[in-house]
Image (cartoon, grey):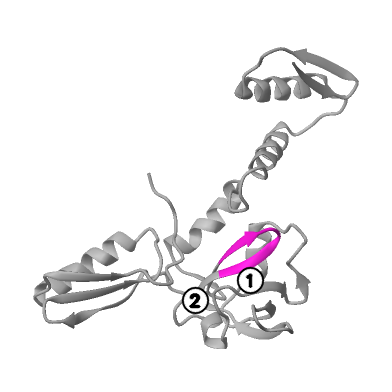
Amino acid sequence: MAVILCGVCTVMAQQLTPDTKLRYANNIIGRYYVDSIDQNHVVEEAIVAMLKTLDPHSQYSNPEETRELTEPLEGNFSGIGIQFNMATDTLYVIQTVSGGPSEKVGILAGDRIVEANDTLIAGVKMKNSQVMKLLRGPKGTKVKLKVLRKGVSEPLDFVVVRDDIPIYSVDAVYMAAPEVGYIKVNRFAEGTGEEVYEALKKLKKKGMKHLILDLDDNGGGPLWR
């Protein structure tokens, strides 16, 4: 037996399926809660709460956050050039963009960024969209970062100059040996397939019969269905 509490209203529901419980609770809250509410916000908060019962990498993003998350996979933008993940309220650098601003100053995969321009990021439950607003900005502007690194006792300070971040997946294409081609794919993005296809065509013209596909340090990307 499930009990749904809504202000002073208590509703008893017997043997409801999980999806029915959610719809039932939403309807009851919408009808009987004493104040007016934003039901879309209530539903989104319910989804966030459900995902918290899973692993730290399962997150919900609203349409605005999704656009900001997918932007690096679709085109160019100005920022510090990292791929990151917010896990347990901590920003982990998954990888730096090859040749990008963060790589140039020495930021490494595995680093944890705890402050950006004196704004605390770690431990404050900051959304991805809020983090991106701190890290991205006009080309040529600076971001002061405080970084924790495994094996280093004291926080490290970096000043990163934002720059245009080109989105390329293929870092290197060449013949590693007679008949052996080599392709280095640093990330998976919307244009990865086309880039790899073009690289394969070039190598085949050079006599490639075997291929080394290097995914070392590839931080992954979107899952397409």
Q: Which residues are drawn in magenta?
A: 84-93
Give x and y (percent) for residue 78: 54, 73
Give x and y (percent) for residue 132: 62, 64
Q: Circle 2 is placed at which residue position?
A: 164
Q: Circle 1 is placed at which residue position?
A: 135
Q: Is residue 222 magenta?
A: no
Per the model, the C-alpha gap separating discs 2 and 1 is 13 Å
Give x and y (percent) for residue 82: 54, 72
* Helix, strand or loop status at disc 1: helix
Q: Sequence-wise, which precedes: disc 2 or disc 1? A: 1
Q: Is residue 87 magenta?
A: yes
Which residue shows up at 26% across the image and 66% down it? 196
Which residue shows up at 43% across the image and 64% down it? 75
From this view, report whether residue 218 is shown above or below residue 147: above
Q: Is residue 121 left or right of residue 140?
A: right
Q: Is residue 1 left or right of residue 103?
A: right
